[in-house]
Image (cartoon, grey):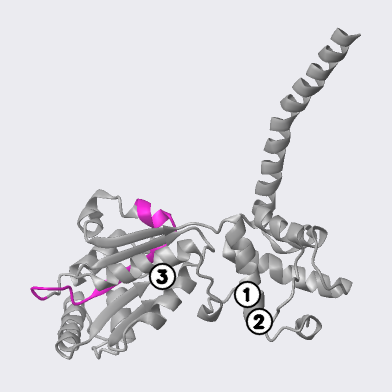
Amino acid sequence: MYLSYFGLSEKPFSIAPNPQYLFLSERHKEALAHLTYGLGEAGGFVLLTGEVGTGKTTLIRSLQEQLPENTQVAMIHNPALSQLELLASICDELIINYDEVNATLKTLTDAIKKHLEANHESGGHTILLIDEAQLLAPDVLEQLRLLTNIETNHKKLLQIVLVGQPELQELLKRNELRQLAQRITARYHLLPLTEGQTIAYIKHRLHVAGCERAMFSADALKTVYAVTKGIPRLVNLLCERCLMGAFSKQVMVIDSEIVMRSAEEALPPSVLQSEVQNETKTSKLLIPFIFVTVLGAGVGLSFIF
């Protein structure tokens, strides 16, 4: 709708995890470095956590593109599975044949073991990526740990990347999962973007989509950060609605008014409520200061007169 109006080649703020639009802030670069380091080790698990919408899935997509060609990757997007279902899903991802009717934990584990050994002997590597890993049941996590027991004298034949929300960290603190926690060779918690990074993120996505001019005013960019707190998914939702709002008003530059109106239309009420609460807290902090200042001024005037 608005693409030709703004001279864009495609929508710059889609929430789809497109690696082409990946903005490598210092935090994202550090996270990617931790993941790469962890996968370069001989250990079994690598852990990436972060709040909803901070860009974990997009980061994993970027990581996949950087893996060596001899790497086989099994990707699990919905880990709310039983032990048997998870092993079957791994077999499906790695194209391992198995008897679906008579499959058991043992037969599936044996099939995976045979595949991992064959891949290793041919000079390959095998990685299992599990998104939304906070949904894994403790017994399923333990089954994953047992898979990392498949090893040579020098390395684990299966490396596992667990990606999830902060609840995953709490899950891994459980006593029955302490053996798994000790096998994590690298871990990183991805934080939201700073104000400067948020502004750079918006400009980056517009640039990738073909925009070379300032489409948001300086105040509008600061308002976007104030409302979204630097969470990329919320930034995308808000900026997408801002473009539609500017198009409907037939203006070429987005100001703070458009940002706030778009926020009311596009963002969850809880996000806006949080912003209102922060403004209220700031106002309450300023009231005593204003009172003291006025009082001080009054005393000064009384003294003079």
Asked if marks 2 and 1 touch (Cβ < 8 Å), the reply is yes
- Tell me which amino acid carries mark 1: Arg
- Mark number, residue 131: 3
Q: Which residue is mark 1?
A: 205
Position of residue 206 measured from the top left corner of the image (x, y, whole percent): 67, 75
Asked if marks 3 and 2 touch (Cβ < 8 Å), the reply is no
Q: Secondary structure at mark 2?
A: loop
Does the magenta-highlighted stretch encompass residue 282?
A: no
Number of the front mark, 3 or 1: 1
Asked if marks 3 and 1 touch (Cβ < 8 Å), the reply is no
- Tell me which amino acid carries mark 2: Ala
Position of residue 293 measured from the top left corner of the image (x, y, whole percent): 77, 23
- Mark number, residue 209: 2
Q: From mark 2 to mark 1, how far is it between C-alphas?
A: 6 Å
Position of residue 181 measured from the top left corner of the image (x, y, whole percent): 25, 56
- Horizontal side of 250 relative to 165 (left or right) equals right
Q: From mark 3 to mark 1, how far is it between C-alphas?
A: 24 Å
Rendering quarter of residue 304? top right
- Horizontal side of 111 relative to 206 (left or right) equals left
